[in-house]
Amino acid sequence: MADLTFVAMTVVTVGGAILALEADEIVYGAIALAGSFFGVAALFFLLNAPYVAVFQITVYIGAVAVLILFTVMLVRQESWAKEASPRSLTRLGGILTGLVMAVALGLAMAGSDLSKYNSLQNTMGFLEIGQLISTNFSIVLEVLALVLAASIVSALFLAKVEKEEKRQ
Amino acid sequence: MNTLADFVLVSAMLFAIGIYGLIVKRSALRMVFAVEIMINAANLNFVAFNQLLPKAANNIIGQTFVLFSIALAAGEAAVILAIVVVAYRLHKDTDVSELKTLKG
């Protein structure tokens, strides 16, 4: 049986995700998304992965959620309320697709023996992660740094060109 | 005690919510939310299934993968949000069905 912390964090995660998509004010949606990220970080803690959990909190809540909040405020429209509500057919299709997906995955899981495995099998060490990143995955780390630099530069470039065009 | 099936079930629910958001929502920002939720579901799966690896020296390879995945998602979010800001400046709207400039 799942314990209380797990149930609480599941409610935070899934509820935050639903609220992020369905909140009337998109600012509240962005804040709910940060809550959902926090719930996932707590699930990482429960899975005995504290390094990933702290990484998730610093990068997702500290960088991505704040970036999203700033963007929401930059593109804020006077009337978010008239955000075109989807046609009921589209909404029905979306709900059906999501439900079918969830049920299919759940059935696949029910057929497996995943529920026999304890969630705390491996004990992990920070040392091993550091060794793995700096030896086997060192090239990946370098490429990742290049990709991050390129994405930041391209984001700046996108915003800058527009400004110059406006001035003309 | 939690079993692995619990975590994978949460991941499946998050993924289904993300699919729903991508299909139903037409606001670019909400679609970014949906994509981030789906990335989180995938990361949760990686860390959960990492527990099935045998106890060896490299039994944390799934967690290492998630570190790279989170960093990639951050770069991706930066570019998408810049595009949203530019689209808003050009069209005064973030509704993706109104952005037809690139349509052939």
Image (cartoon, rainbow, N blue to C red):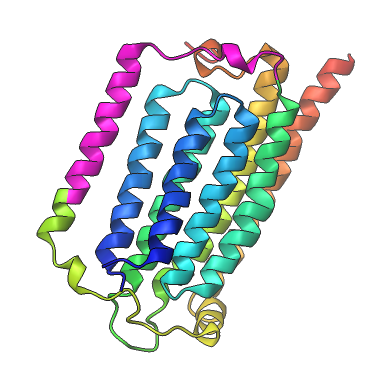
First to last magenta residue range: A77-106
Magenta segment main secondary structure:
helix
* Location of residue B55 with respect to A105 vertically, above or below: below
State the residue at coordinates (53%, 29%): A23
**Residue B2's x, y, as percent?**
31, 70
Is there any visible trace of residue B77 in the rendered image? yes
Q: Residue A96, percent across and down?
A: 25, 28
Identify the residue shown where x is 37% and y is 81%. B59
Q: Is residue A149 left or right of residue A87?
A: right
Quadrant where the image shows the N terminus of chain B:
bottom left
Name the residue: 89% across, 17% down: A167
Image coordinates of residue B30 in percent, x first then y, are: 53, 30
Q: Residue at x 54, y 76 (%)?
A: A133
Is residue A85 highlighted in magenta? yes
Where B85 sits versus A125, above or below?
Answer: above
User: From the viewer's perspective, is residue B60 above or below residue A166?
Assistant: below
Q: Is residue B80 visible?
A: no
Q: Where residue A8 sits in the image (x, y, percent)?
A: 44, 57
Q: Horizontal placement of A52 versus B59: left or right?
A: right
Furthest toward the left, the residue is A111
Q: How many marks?
A: 0
- Picture quadrant where residue A80 is located: top right
Quadrant of residue A138 within the rendered picture: bottom right
Task: Name the residue nearer the viewer: A118 or A74.
Answer: A118
Extreme residue in the right direction? A167
Judging depth in this view, the residue of B58 and A151 nearest the camera is B58
